[in-house]
């Protein structure tokens, strides 16, 4: 059993753990969207292996871990990965900072879709603190990109 066969799966598991690990309340609102970032990288690098179906399944797992209604995160994640996979050839040619702004835009879309779906189910009100992870996801993207690219090249994942 080679590690390269499980590298994508392990990176998604690590992202799920980072998404639910307890943090101090003052820092919690700034937590980057680890799962979205990792899935975004793999969708850009290997769109034939990480696609909307995988995003939907990982979103369901995230729904279970976060305790939200089933389908909220999976729907929002699927929309974002669909946009990335359908435009991956164009997005690969952008610089890392341009990609970071695109990831930030997709992260904002993700949070707004999650808010909208939760607002339909409950009476959640919108607070601008919901969008702090957009900024931190943009700032973390270059490091996630570099780390996962190194993993992909090290293990020759294709």
Image: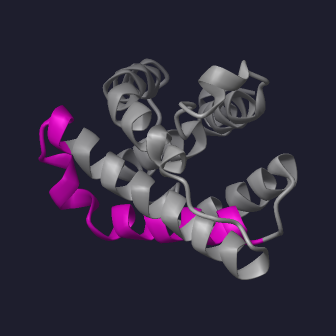
Q: Nearer the viewer, residue 27 or 85?
A: 27
Question: Residue at left 70%, top 55%?
Answer: 58
Q: Quadrant of the N terminus?
A: top right
- Secondary structure character of the magenta stretch overall: helix
Q: Decide if residue 127 is on the left or right side of residue 9.
A: left
Image spot of residue 54 (x, y percent): 63, 60
User: What scheme was used to colour the molecule?
Assistant: one colour
- Seen in the picture, residue 53 relative to 4 is either above or below; the reply is below
Q: Kindly tell me whether residue 5 is visible in this rendering.
A: yes
Question: Residue at left 83%, top 68%?
Answer: 69
Q: Decide if residue 2 is on the left or right side of residue 102.
A: right
Q: Nearer the viewer, residue 77 or 57?
A: 77
Count every numbered label the image shows and give the total: 0
Name which quarter of the figure residue 85 lies in: bottom left
The residue segment tinted magenta is 71-98
Image spot of residue 6 (x, y percent): 67, 34
Question: Residue at left 71%, top 37%?
Answer: 16
């Amino acid at each position: 059993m080679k590690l390269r066969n499980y590298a994508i799966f392990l990176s998604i598991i690590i992202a799920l753990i980072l998404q639910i690990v307890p943090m101090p309340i003052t820092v919690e609102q700034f937590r980057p969207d680890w799962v979205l970032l990792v899935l975004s990288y793999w969708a850009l690098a290997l769109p034939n292996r990480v696609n909307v179906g995988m995003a939907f399944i990982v979103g369901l797992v995230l729904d279970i871990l976060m305790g939200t209604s089933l389908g909220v995160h999976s729907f929002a994640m699927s929309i974002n990965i669909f946009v990335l996979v359908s435009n991956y050839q164009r997005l690969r040619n952008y610089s890392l900072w341009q990609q970071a702004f695109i990831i930030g835009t997709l992260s904002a879309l993700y949070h707004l879709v999650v808010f909208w779906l939760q607002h339909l189910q409950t009476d959640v009100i919108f607070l601008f603190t919901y969008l702090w992870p957009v900024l931190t996801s943009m700032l973390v993207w270059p490091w996630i990109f570099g780390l996962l690219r190194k993993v992909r090249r090290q293990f020759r994942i294709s």
